[in-house]
Image (cartoon, rainbow, N blue to C red):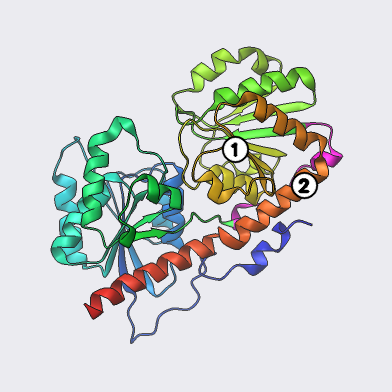
Amino acid sequence: MRLNRFHKLMRISYVSGEKQNSPSKDSLPRKVLLTIDTLGIGGAERQFVMLVKCLPPTWEPLVWSMDDGFYLKILKDSNISVVTCERRSKWSVKPFLNLQRTIKEWQPEVVHSWSWWSAIYSSIICHTFRIPFANGIVRSASIPKDRLALVYLSRLAFLFSDIVISNTQAGLNAWKVPRSKRMVVYNGFDFNRLNFERLPNMASTDKTIVIMTARMSPAKDFFTFLEAAKVLAKIDDKFVFWVVGNGPEKSKIMNKFDDLIREGKVILFDGGNEVIQLVQKAHIGVLMSNRAEGCSNSIMEYMACGLPVICSDGEGNRELVKNGETGFIVQPKDINALVEKILYLKQNATIAIRMGDAGEKRIYNEFSLETMVTNTVHLYEKLIYQKQVG
């Protein structure tokens, strides 16, 4: 049985955006400033916007960003106030001064940052003004070797942070966050994104659709996925492989696997902002990576849609996927293991369906949007209380 048909009946009002209970005249909403480097399309940006939109009515959010990307209109359409200040050069001080003025004039009770520069700026300003600061810069379980200067500045910002939030325990460990400042708030999935319509499962369909959704960057290993597709296409012509995403590696992928694309064994889709309709039509979800993952939005989407998952062993993936229960974890770049697990799921449809159901329940029970919002609000309240008691 699928959980999806019941999800909308079980949502709490503020998570679905229906802020029905307004604060009384005697109690003004608490102010929280949420800062981020960009409002462009991305997994972290989606999580950020969902949190802002779904805060309970006892909180008044203000968003500060260094650009006016895709999500700006969505926030404004939701009556969320937004301040933007473009960073025109790498070391420009204009955004820092703008954020400092915003904090001084608006006087938030707590500040929560989600990315590199906004966290570095906010840590200094909040420390100066003695405002509780939640540093949410840790979004992955790997240290980017091409941005070591920023990594160094970010670690310095930990010193001026009241708490450092990560979406995985693996991320906190990788970044060596001081233990006294650690907190995990997992990403949340909004089940209202689902349309509750799916293709038949593997037990009752002719074709088996295997999907991988991710940004086509060096961090994501589409090449191992498609090498496995090449092997499987020769074993069983009922497989179809969907590659969903965009990015700098796309042309390389298209050139190397042109034969599979021409034969219709591999179908490419642009990612865009919403991929869930494609995920719902697939039967197996795959994510192979070249670096340690945080709390993968792709894997959460697979599991929420009831797909069994096969992913590479990448730190945060183990906090999402229960190996042998909701899917399989294989070693990075192991084409043979990936082929073996995909074949196993196709040949054992009952087990695949059971794994998909278990994953769906796991996301609903432990990784819902409601849980993410509730845990974040509790953190804000804790930080404010700690300041009040000294």
**Res 269 quadrant in image:** top right
- Quarter of the image with the C terminus is bottom left
- Residue on which disc 1 sits: 311
State the residue in front, 377 or 312: 312
Tell me the element at label 1.
strand
Provide residue 196's location: percent of width, then percent of height: 71, 53
Range of residues picked out in magenta: 191-207
The 10 Å Cα crowd at callout 1, few under 14, some 14 to 19, many 20 or more, is many
Q: Residue furthest bottom?
A: 26
- Quarter of the image with the N terminus is bottom right
Q: Which mark is residue 353?
A: 2
Q: Residue 223: within the magenta?
A: no
Give left or right: position of 262 versus 121. right
The relative height of residue 326 versus residue 103 in the rendered view (above or below) is: above
The 10 Å Cα crowd at callout 2, few under 14, some 14 to 19, many 20 or more, is many
- How far is the residue under mark 2 from the one under mark 1? 17 Å
Provide residue 371's location: percent of width, then percent of height: 52, 64
Q: Residue at x 71, y 33 (%)?
A: 341
Give left or right: position of 240 versus 257. right
Q: Residue furthest right?
A: 204
Amino acid at the residue labelled 1: Cys
Tell me the element at label 2.
helix
Q: Residue at x 63, y 49 (%)?
A: 322
Give left or right: position of 45 versus 188. left
User: Do the CB atoms of the residues marked 2 and 1 lie less than 8 Å apart?
Assistant: no
Amino acid at the residue labelled 2: Ile
